[in-house]
Amino acid sequence: MLQLKTPLSPVESEMLLQCLLEMENDLKSKHTTSNQDLQKRTALISARQKVESHIYDCFYREEITNMVFALDSLSRKYNEQLTEQTSSETAASVGSSLRTVATTRAKLKQAAAPK
C-alpha cells in the first residue's frame, strides 16, 4: 500500500474528486464490460471513496496511476483554454487551476515513486 507523504489541501481534494468522477462517468458511458474497464472503474471508485474520506495512507498503485491520469487529462483541458484571445482574468484563473493540478499530481507521483 502507498501513502501520500503530504496530504492534499481541500482545493486539491475537490479538484481530484471532480477528475475521478468525470473519468468514472466516461467509463460508464462506454457501456463496455471488458475486464480492463471494470478493473479501472473499480480502482477509480475506490480512489474516489478514499479521497472523499480523507484517507491518504492506503492507496494501491493502480489507484494512484488512475488519479495521475485523471489530473493529466484535466491539465490538457485547461491548457486548451489558453489562447492568444484569452482574457487576462480567465488566464489567471486557468493558471491557478493548472498550479493546483500540478501540485496534486506531484504529491501523487511522490507517493508512487520507488523508495
Image: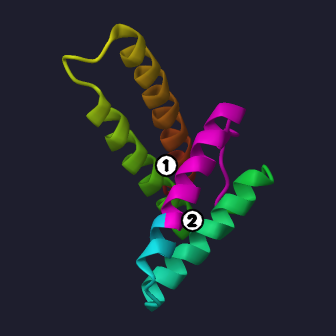
Could you tell me residue 60's position as x and y percent? 61, 68
From the top left corner, tell me how far across and down residue 106 is, in percent: 49, 40
Quarter holding the C terminus is bottom right
Residue sitting at x 43%, y 86%: 32
Q: Is residue 43 covered in magenta?
A: no
Q: Residue furthest right?
A: 53
Identity of the residue drawn at 56% across and 57% down: 20
Q: Which residue is mark 2?
A: 63
Q: CA distance from mark 2 to mark 1?
A: 11 Å
Disc number placed over residue 109 in the picture, else none: 1
**Where residue 36 sits: x, y (%)?**
44, 84
In terms of sequence position, does the residue under pointer 2 or pointer 1 come before the other? 2
Magenta span covers which residues?
1-25
Q: Which mark is residue 22?
A: none
- Is 10 magenta? The answer is yes
Other-residue count near label 1 (Cα within 10 Å), few / some / many at <14 / 14–19 / ≥20: some
Viewer-proximal residue, 89 or 3? 89
